[in-house]
Image (cartoon, rainbow, N blue to C red):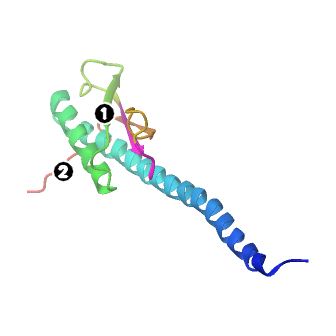
Amino acid sequence: MSTGSERGSGLVEMVWLGLLLLLPLLWVVLSVSEVQRGSFGVSGAARAAARAYALAPDDAAGEQRARAVAQQALADQGLRDVPLEVTVTCSPYPRACHTGTSVITVRVASAVDLPLLPDLFGLGRPRFALDAEETVPIGRYQEVTRP
C-alpha cells in the first residue's frame, strides 16, 4: 500500500528518465545533421575546385582558383572557419596538368566540429574529418566567350 508522500513520484521519475534519454538522442541528431552539412559542402567543394582548376590557363592559376572556389563552396554551406586542404594531382603528366590528355584529381579535406562538446584537456573541440575527390579530364570543361 502506498503512502500519501509517494503520490506523483512516478510522474517525476518518468520526466527525469525522459530527459536523460532525450538529451543524448538530441545530440546524435544535431551531430548527424552537422556531419551531413559538412559532407555536402566538401563534395560540392571538390566538384567546383576540379572545374575551376580545369578551366584555369595554367597550373599556378589553377591552384589558386581551386582553393578559392573550395572555400566559397564550403562557405555556401555555412562552413566558414573550418580547416581546408586542397590537393591536386595529375596523370600522366604530374608536373604539367594542363598538357595533352591529363586527368586532374582534386581532393578536398576538411572537418566539422561536433556540436555541444567542449574543448577537453586543451586538445580542441572534437571534430569529424571529411574528404571528397573529383576527377576531371582536361578539356571536359571549356570557357566559351560570345562576341
Mark 1: amino acid: Val
Disc 2 marks a residue whose amino acid type is Val
- Can I make out residue 82 in this image? yes
89 or 146, which is in the foreground?
Answer: 89
**Total marks drawn?**
2
Quadrant for residue 146, please give it: bottom left
Identify whether 146 is placed above or below 57.
below
Comparing 9 with 1, the one in front is 1
Residue 8 percent coordinates (x, y): 73, 79
Mark linked to residue 86:
1
Pointer 2: residues within 10 angstroms few (<14), some, or many (20+)? few
**In this rendering, position of residue 143 left or right of residue 79:** left
Using the image, determine if residue 38 lies above or below residue 8: above
Q: What range of the chain is rendered magenta?
A: 105-118
Q: Main secondary structure of the magenta part?
A: strand
Q: Is residue 15 left or right of residue 119?
A: right
Q: Is there any visible trace of residue 102 in the rendered image?
A: no
**2 or 1: tag closer to the N-terminus:** 1
Tag of residue 144: 2
Quarter of the rendering occupied by the C terminus? bottom left
Q: Position of residue 7 (x, y in %)?
A: 76, 80
Q: Secondary structure at mark 1?
A: strand
Residue 134: numbered disc: none
Marks 2 and 1 sit apart, C-alpha to C-alpha, by: 26 Å
The crowding category of the residue bearing disc 1, from other C-alpha atoms within 10 Å (few below 14, some 14 to 19, many at least 20), is: many
Give above or below for 121 relative to 91.
below
Residue 143 horizontal/vertical position (percent): 20, 47
Report if residue 109 lies within the magenta region: yes
Residue beneath the point at 31% across and 33% down: 85
